[in-house]
Amino acid sequence: MPRLTVDEMKKMREASKKEMSLREGDFRGKLTVHLGTCGIAAGAREIMDTFLEEFDKRDITDIMFTSTGCAGLCSYEPMITVEIGETPPIKYGKLTPEKAIKILEQHIIEGNLVKEYAIGMGSERVG
């Protein structure tokens, strides 16, 4: 394996810091990409990459970006959960990069539910 150069290590460090900054701090909402085995097989990594690229292009820093495992709805993968402010979490499924961008623009930025891609509202949390 070739050795890393100092410049390559600096780039990796900056990329890591940028990713961590999306997971810390004060946010108005949270975007979770479901990356269980079923999600990955269905294309969730491409959805995650789409959101990361769009967050970067649009300089979105007030939404926490995170990932989780399977949500138990494998036939709806790839899936995300969007939580904005005090509104209930919304699960979106059967996503493509184009659908992800529409959800970003309409729900995450403008605050409007994208009903045609929503598969559930609320939380599975107890208590």
Image (cartoon, rainbow, N blue to C red):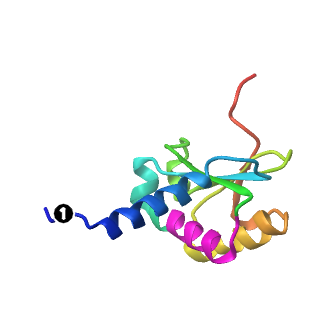
Nearest to the observer: residue 124 or residue 31: 31
Residue furthest left in the image: 1
| Most common SS among magenta residues | helix
Using the rendered image of the protein, determine whether residue 30 is visible from the camera's viewpoint. Answer: yes
Q: Is residue 53 left or right of residue 5?
A: right
Please report the residue visible at 63 percent of the width from the left and 77 percent of the height from the top. Answer: 57
Q: Quick one: quadrant of the N terminus?
A: bottom left
19 or 101, which is in the foreground?
Answer: 19
Residue 82 visible: no
Q: Residue at left 50%, top 49%?
A: 74
Q: Is residue 113 left or right of residue 60?
A: right
Write the start and end of the magenta stretch as one range: 47-60
Q: Can you identify the residue that label 1 sits on?
A: 3
* Amino acid type shown at disc 1: Arg
Q: Please state the horizontal and vertical placement of residue 70, each as a whole percent of the image.
A: 50, 43
Up-down relation of residue 41 to residue 24 (above or below): below
Q: Name the outermost residue toward the top.
A: 127
Crowding at label 1, few (<14), some or many (≥20) Cα neighbours within 10 Å?
Answer: few
Which part of the image, by quadrant, shows the C terminus?
top right
**Residue 73 place in picture, x, y as percent:** 55, 46
Secondary structure of the residue carrying tag 1 is loop
* Quarter holding residue 118: bottom right
Residue 57: in magenta span = yes
Residue 47: x and y, percent? 53, 66
Which residue lies at the image location 61% right of the left edge and 72% below the top edge? 56
